[in-house]
Amino acid sequence: MLPPASGTGKFYAKAAKSIRLIRQGCTNRPFFHISVTHRKRLNSQPVIEQLGSYDPMPNVHNEKLVALNLERIKYWLGKGAHVSPPVAELFGLAGFFPIHPRSYMNAWRNRKTTQENIAKQMEEEKAKETANL
Amino acid sequence: MFSNLLSLRGVAAIVNIFSRQTKLQRNVPNLTNFSTTSVACVNFFNKLPAEKLWKSVTSVSNAGAKKGRGKGAGRIRIRDLNRGQVIGIGRINMLWPGLSAPVIRGRELLKQQRLPDDPERMEKLTKLRDSMTKFRRLRLSPIERGWSGTRMPGRSIGPPDPIGEDEFVGFDTKVLQLRSLLIMKGNLGRTRNYQAMVVTGNGQGLAGFGLGKGKEAVAALRKAKNKAGQKLMHFEIYNGHTVFHDFYTAFGKTKIFVQKKNEGYGLRCHRAIKEICQAIGIKDLRAKLEGSNNLQNIVKAFFIGLLQQRTHQQLAEEKKLHLVEYRAENEYFPTVVASPSKVRTKEEILKDETLDFIQYVMDDRVILRKKKFPRFYEKMPHYKIYLKKYEKYRNHEKIRLMLKTEYGEVKSFLNDRYPEEKVESEA
Amino acid sequence: MTIFFRNLVQNNVKIILTRNSDSQLFTVSYRNLSILPSVYDGKEDPAPKFFSSNVQVLLRRLTRPDFAKVFRKRTNSGRDVLKTPSYKFLTDEELEAEIAKANKRADRLLQMPPIVKIHQPINEILSEDPALIGYDNVKYLFTDITFGVANAHRIIVERDPDGILRSSDHDIRKRLNQTYFPIKGRKLREPIMFTDKDRLNSLLESEKYEFVLDRACIQYEPDEPSYQKITSITYQHIDMNKNYDMLRSTRHFGPMAFYITWHQSIDNLMLELLQTSAVREAVLLTALRHEIHGDLANGEQVQALVHQILPTPIQLSKPDRLTEEDIELDNKCVECIEKYIVGNSAMKSQQELALQGFREYYQQMIELSRGLKKAHGNA
């Protein structure tokens, strides 16, 4: 009953294509297919081809797994397929694309929040110490 | 004569007290009012014998019988009202030496005497009398029962009777058929005969079948069993579990296609063939019936087929070629099971000769394989919905098993990482 | 910022520590088994010697393949029920062709698991990007699932939380390959019979060597340390208990013979061969030793003898009658082994005793067969 990875969606040669994440999985358990489909098509509709998968939940070893069919991705990129930002970010992390600016932004934001949290902790400790004194 | 009559009188006196109906059955003259003048004490009950009276109660008119009356649960049955009654023992518990007790007990000569009464005697009698009125079906244990209910076919009736001092050790007989035959006779009208077909065997290659007829079912079975014991045949069993090769056999309009099978396949065939195989000791076989399914013909055809089997050596000699066996569990290693004395070369083989082993042993006959149609629900819309719905559960069983082997229960590594979640869900 | 860095570094150190401690734990856990596993991790690579045609021929011959055992009924072939056997009528030529085909299948069934050096850890950094630090606190693993790429050549990279993109190490590669391209019979988690020394020990004690070796072949790659440790323990157990016959006619005998020859401990096997009067195989074993180590005094003589032995049929059982050529060849073999015992053996007295026993038995055989020949010739 599962559609084959080669996809079952209708294919129009001249229509714009897009490589994007399509949520599979179920409630509380996200899992994404990296698929190529028409830009104007909904994510719930059959895709042209599945190009990989992305599991956003870390596994036992604390890793996120990404599978990419690089040969087919190159083919669709050559055909002028558009790449959605989340997919472009993954490609960037994989070293396939240059790092996406959004990855840098996220990294910077995360670093900043951790710094702020640490500063807050330090202050609280100091306050406690002064109070104790 | 008189003493005889007297004793009869005594009995009658006792019996009369119990039951009015007994009196009319016995038709004993009323000796208490013995006189020469005739008394008009003749009535409906003592005018007719018991048989006729019972008939008047139980009989159903011809038209009624046609409608099915007088059958089943509400049916009135003839009862033996004298059941449990013994001459010399009655309501008054008397000891009658020579009738209900010995005349001499030890060295003492017994005398007529009255014993204490048994107050429950009457109840016991009625209970015994009524116990026969209800019809009870015979209950058989699941091991004992045959193909269907309490009917005889498929049931075991033990080994054939010994002939002189030769006993049939290790034999068991199975009933294959027991039927009644109705024959018209000039003076007797329609008479009923029973015919039985049984198979007997020791499970180690010796088996035989027999046909017996008799006035009673038991007699027919006994005759058939003993006849089967007289006609034992020996069959070789391939590796102790199956036949030597596939074969086709027929008797009358019955055609049987028998296939050799691997160990552990079991017996998938007509129930009569299954019983025969069990009697012989064949454990794995498939048989397909075509044409008439007359049981006697099936049995005969199957026995003929078994007898006409050829050993591997015979087949190799017939073909003048090596016979080679391939087994999947041995990685299809070619094992030569039989070689002829002289092997033909490729040039000597005729152009249109059948070389395929199965085709050769089956006499160029092919088993009819009926087309398998999809189940009726597979085309219905709800089945597609069901498949879609249950797709996501398709691996759950496997995963639960894996988790159980890994953690001893159904849980994920996330349970250890977030123990508070589990506590919450339990609460 | 610095504290954050320290956190990260600590994390990484932990990962590295756990990685190293894993392999250490493994060896420690086997120390109680009283067998010390030794693996092919020295300077010399065993692969060129193992794959050289001379050694392969010797190993194959030492396996002593008996078709009755090679094509025995196997229960581990993935069949849950037996199949009905099939039959064919064959002429002489067709039968020969079928037997030739079966020989090829036997070759496949007897194909030896390769012996190679332990792999080196992969430590290749592809790019470093400090600006990505803190992007996520878990690793990202990227696998190229392009169709038709061999598992060994598949691109598998990881992006660490500190922004370094590196090629994944062998254990991760194996895990991801098994996740995306599962091999039948291989488990993601190591089976407990390999991780638990008591279980492995009980299996070895009950002499289920073939099962252990077969399963190890499926579960591991030949260049993995775990594979080599388990096979090494099994081979040593067999060698200690002289259970060589259990591995004969299987694909594991060659690697075992290679293993014990490589580690200079063929004396037990030699003794067994002499006791079962398989002198020709004993010569082949010395030849194998010469091929691998080249330390025999009469190396060239042995090699010449091997060329004579190889064309003779495999002796599955003791021969009934001897021809003059057989006698000549066997006498040469005995001479060779004498020299070996004097020069290289570590169990001289026992092996000499066994050889003496063989000589006496052989003398009887010679007399018997010569007498028979005379009788037949006269008649």
Image (cartoon, coloured by chain):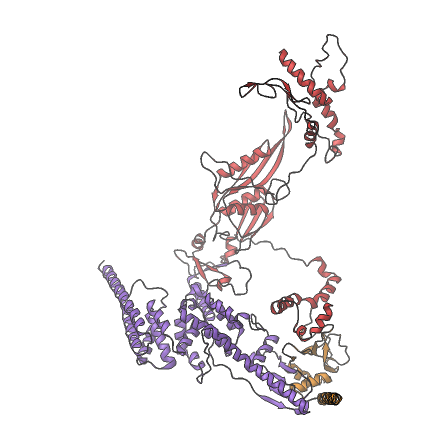
Chain colours: A orange, B red, C purple
Place residue B118 in its image quadrant: top right
Q: Residue furthest top?
A: B36
**Can the viewer see residue A113?**
no
Q: Is residue B241 left or right of residue B188?
A: left
C340 and C232: which one is in front?
A: C232
Q: How many marks?
A: 0
In the rendered image, residue C37, in percent from the top left (x then y), is placed at 46, 76
In the rendered image, residue C300, in percent from the top left (x then y), is placed at 32, 80
Q: Is residue C153 left or right of residue A48?
A: left
In the rendered image, residue B41, in percent from the top left (x then y), is placed at 76, 14
Is residue C139 depicted above or below B96 in this figure?
A: below
In the rendered image, residue A90, in percent from the top left (x then y), is placed at 68, 84
Is residue B158 depicted above or below B290 in this figure?
A: above
A93 and B220: which one is in front?
A: A93
**Can the viewer see residue C244?**
yes
Q: Is residue B191 left or right of residue B250?
A: right
Q: Residue furthest front?
A: A133
Place residue B79 in its image quadrant: top right
B326 and B41: which one is in front?
A: B41
The quadrant of the rendering that contains the N terminus of chain B is top right
A85 and B324: which one is in front?
A: A85
Is residue C319 depicted above or below B177 in this figure?
A: below
The quadrant of the rendering that contains the C terminus of chain B is bottom right
